Image (spheres, helix red, strand yellow):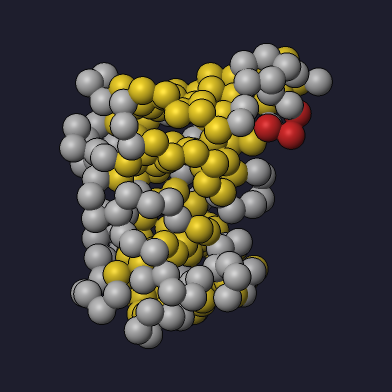
Amino acid sequence: QKEVEQNSGPLSVPEGAIASLNCTYSDRGSQSFFWYRQYSGKSPELIMFIYSNGDKEDGRFTAQLNKASQYVSLLIRDSQPSDSATYLCAVNSGNTPLVFGKGTRLSVIA
Amino acid sequence: GAGVSQSPSNKVTEKGKDVELRCDPISGHTALYWYRQRLGQGLEFLIYFQGNSAPDKSGLPSDRFSAERTGESVSTLTIQRTQQEDSAVYLCASSLLTGGVGYTFGSGTRLTVV
């Protein structure tokens, strides 16, 4: 059974701080890694994806992947109250549907 | 269309009744997925369609659940003899390919079984 684990939170950070969200996965053959943001009552929206070991930056967001440790993270710099949401980690192995974690709830305090 | 469209947005049904949920994917997207999200929970995979291949039904929780897709367009998820534990948001997503790309989700159908 392929599993994706996330700390459910809530993770509370002050406005302007760095939020660090973590995810581990069980399938060593996983190839693609995604972070989705889900506001309360809304559907998930894709914010980052990463395929290779290392860091990938997009604006205030940085995704980090370590395949040896089966670990992927999302850093949000200069956190804003509008970043308050649930962040879902999703993993895929080839032509299979994404497996999602249960999400980490982030609260950015103004 | 411009996005993934789902209908109805909300559905309240009595226990034991059948329901049909509809998903209209982004035009040109060959892959279509159904997920279920119970309150406060993560996304649970149900079924996916890829072009004209046989669908992957491995996530369907029971034989009360079924889904169809017409070619590479509209899909219908049917739940027969609904139970209270079926209450959830049913999310449809589509993508250009099956693997290695992100999905675009619809706004979901909130199903409440009373």
With respect to residue B21, does B112 lie above or below? above
Q: Position of residue B41 (x, y in %)?
A: 49, 43
Left or right: residue B22 versus residue A71 is: right
Q: Quadrant of the C terminus of chain A?
A: top right
Q: Total marks drawn?
A: 0
Residue under the image location 64 percent in, 69 percent down: B9
Left or right: residue A43 versus residue A78 is: left
Q: Quadrant of the N terminus of chain A?
A: top left
Pick whichever, A84 or B110, lies toward us.
A84
Quarter-of-image position of residue A79: top right
With respect to residue A94, does A17 lie above or below? above
Residue farthest along the bottom direction in this orientation? B70
Q: Is residue B50 visible?
A: yes
Q: Position of residue A24 (x, y in %)?
A: 34, 26
Residue under the image location 74 percent in, 34 percent down: A82
Residue farthest along the left direction in this orientation? A29
Residue farthest along the right direction in this orientation? A110
Pick whichever, B40 or B114, lies toward us.
B40
Q: Is residue B86 visible?
A: no
With respect to residue A2, does B56 lie above or below? below
Quarter-of-image position of residue B103: bottom left
Q: Position of residue A48 (x, y in %)?
A: 49, 39
Pick whichever, A27 or A105, lies toward us.
A27
Residue under the image location 45 percent in, 29 percent down: A56
Q: Position of residue B27 (x, y in %)?
A: 49, 75
Residue under the image location 22 percent in, 75 percent down: B53
